[in-house]
Image: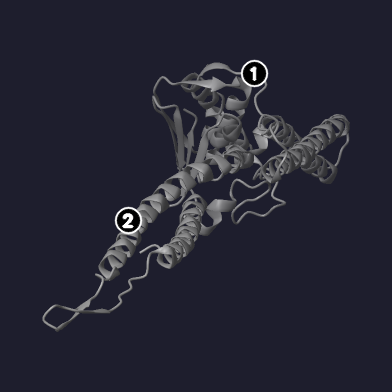
Amino acid sequence: MRGASDWSVKTRLSVLVGALFLLSGAILLAANYLLVQANLPTPISFAGERTSADGSVRVTVLQPLQDYRDATLTTLLVQSSAALALAAALAVLLGRVVAGRVLRPVKQITAAARRLSIDNLERHRLAMSGKRDELTELADTFDDMLDRLSDAFDSQRRFVANASHELRTPLAIQHTMIEVALTRPGMSAEFTDLGQRLLAMNARSERLIEGLLVLAMSDRGLSAERPVRLDDVVRQVVQAHRADADHAGVALHADLEPAVVSGDVLLLEQMVANLVQNAIRHNHRGGEVWLRVDATSSLTVENTGAVVPEEALASLTEPFRRVAVDRTASDQGVGLGLSIVASVVAAHGGALETHARPGGGLTVVTRLG
C-alpha cells in the first residue's frame, strides 16, 4: 500500500490545499456556530398568580423556546458540515488543476532533461518566457548549464579532431622513412626485423588516429541525412573483408533483408566495418561470423571466440577497453572498435545491445529503425 510519501508532488499539493481549506472552513463553522448560539433567543419562563372566582390559584407559564433553539443549531451544524465537505472536495480538485499549471514548467524541464544526449545539447533549450519567478529562474539556470555542457563537449571534440589531424602528418612521414630505410641494400636481418616492427607499430598508431577522428566526427552528430540501404552497406563491407576472414581462418555468413535507414553512409560503413573487424579479430581459426539484417533496420553481428564475462559487457563500448587482451599487442586493434560503433548508433538515434554467447564469442545488435 502506498503511503503519503509515495504520492506525486501534484497529489500532495492538491491534498494540502484541500486540507487547508477544510481546516479554515472548520474554524469558520465553529465561529459561526458560536455566534448563532449566542444570538438565538434564550428560553425564559415566568410564573404569575391570579385568584379565580372560586378562590383557587392558577399559575401561567410561557412555553419554553428550547426546542426551537436546539433544532436551529442542529440544522446549522449538519448543513454547514455537509457544505464544508463538498467545498473541501471541490478545493482538492481545483488544487490539483492549479498544481498542474504551477508544475507545468517543472515538467518541461524534466522532459528536456530526458531528451538530452551529447549529440543534441545544442537543440534543446527551455527559453521560458513570462513573469520572472522561481520557476523561470530554474529554467534559465538549466539553459545556462546546457550552454556550459555544450561548450565543454564542443571543446573536447575540437581538441580530439585537431590533435588527430596534427598527428597524422608525422606518422605518415615516419612510415615513409621506415619503408625507404628497409629498401636500402645490405640491411641486416636484425635491422629488417626492427623495421617491420616499427611499421607495425606505426600502422597501429595510424589506426588509433583514424579511430579518434571517426569517433570525434560521430560525436558531433549528423550534419546531413539521406536514405541508405543498410543491407547494401553490410554486403559491401563483407565483400571487402573476405580476404581478411580467409587469412584468419574465419567463415563469414550474411543473411541480409532489404532495409532502409536515414543517416550518413560513411559513418554506417565505418560502424559495420568495425563490427566485422572485431568479429574476425576476436575469433579463432575455424571460427564463424554471422551477420543478419532484417526489415526493421536491425543489424546483428554474432561471432564465435573466447568466452566473454558478463561483467565485462558494460565496459566494452568504452574507449580503449578490451577483454583479457594485452594493451600493447599490435595485432589486436586499438580498443576503439565498439566505442565508434556505439557513437555512430547514438548519432543515428538507435540502440546498441551486447550479449555474451554461451559457447564463447559475442552478439552485438544495433537497432537503427
Residue 42, image x, y percentages: 37, 70
Q: Is residue 363 above or below residue 231?
A: below
Q: Is residue 36 above or below residue 233?
A: below
Q: Quadrant of the N terminus?
A: bottom left
- Residue lying at the far left in this picture: please name it: 54
User: What residue is rendered at 55% in x and 52% in y?
Assistant: 314
Q: Quadrant of residue 291?
A: top left
User: What residue is rendered at 81% in x and 43% in y?
Assistant: 189
User: What residue is rendered at 37% in x and 65% in y?
Assistant: 41
Label disc, if present, on residue 79 of the rendered structure: 2
Label disc, if present, on residue 91 of the rendered structure: none
User: What is the CA distance from the residue labelled 2 to the residue labelled 1?
Assistant: 70 Å
Q: In the rendered view, how is the structure colored?
A: one colour
Q: Can residue 362 be seen by looking at this rendering?
A: no
Q: Which residue is mark 1?
A: 224
Disc 1 on helix, strand or loop? loop
- What residue type is disc 1 on? Ala
Mark 2 closeness class: few <14, some 14–19, many ≥20 residues within 10 Å: few
